[in-house]
Amino acid sequence: MKRLFQLAIPIAACFIATITFAAGDLKIGVIDAEKILRDSKGAKKAQELLREDFQSKQGRLTSKEKEIRQAEDELKRIEEKGKPEDVKEKREQLVQLVKDYKRLQSDLEEQFKKDKMEATQKILGEINEVVSSFAKNEKYTLVLEKKQYVWASDATDITDQIIRLYDMKK
């Protein structure tokens, strides 16, 4: 189904282009969304904010790591001169600390991925608004995303213009 949809977009674009070409002026633009997400100031700022947020949360992982190391050291001391029941209890505590650490790590990674996806979707929405406005003002018939076609002349690439407009908007 996804493959069918991927084929439908270029076919529809060709159909529209054929009709428009027959009717008169045809102006096609191409954007590279990945480049916009990589190079625009707004996207870079969003990525930096995400990174800072993630690094601040990394501190919790670091403190858990210290707890685990301390528990390991304590377990070694208890194993050398402690009672078997103390050793067993300390091992169970260590296992629980490791589980908590792994759970926290997984939760933080999942939250980071979710936040990154939400930020990307927000930026793409803003970019779509800029592209729509630009296309209407410049009288483009069709604007395609780079992944949706096989080949196009570099003359049709409007990515840098969109980046400039998006950065001015931000």
Image (cartoon, rainbow, N blue to C red):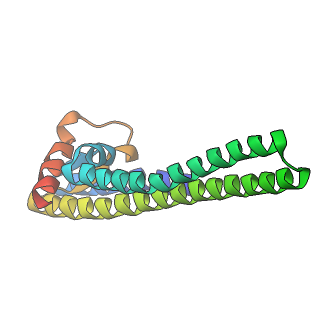
Q: Position of residue 39 (x, y in %)?
A: 24, 43
Q: Position of residue 23 (x, y in %)?
A: 19, 58
Q: Residue at x 42, y 61 (%)?
A: 115
Q: Please tell me whether residue 40 is drawn above or below residue 80 in the rendered image.
A: below
The outermost residue toward the right is 84
Q: Residue at x 52, y 52 (%)?
A: 63
Q: Tell me if 59 is positioned left or right of 162 in this view.
A: right
Q: Position of residue 51 (x, y in %)?
A: 36, 50
Which one is in front, 28 or 116? 116
The outermost residue toward the front is 81
Q: How many marks?
A: 0
Which one is in front, 22 or 160? 160
Which one is in front, 90 or 24? 90
Q: Tell me if 61 is positioned left or right of 50 in this view.
A: right
Residue 146: tell me if it is visible.
Answer: yes
Q: Residue at x 49, y 61 (%)?
A: 111
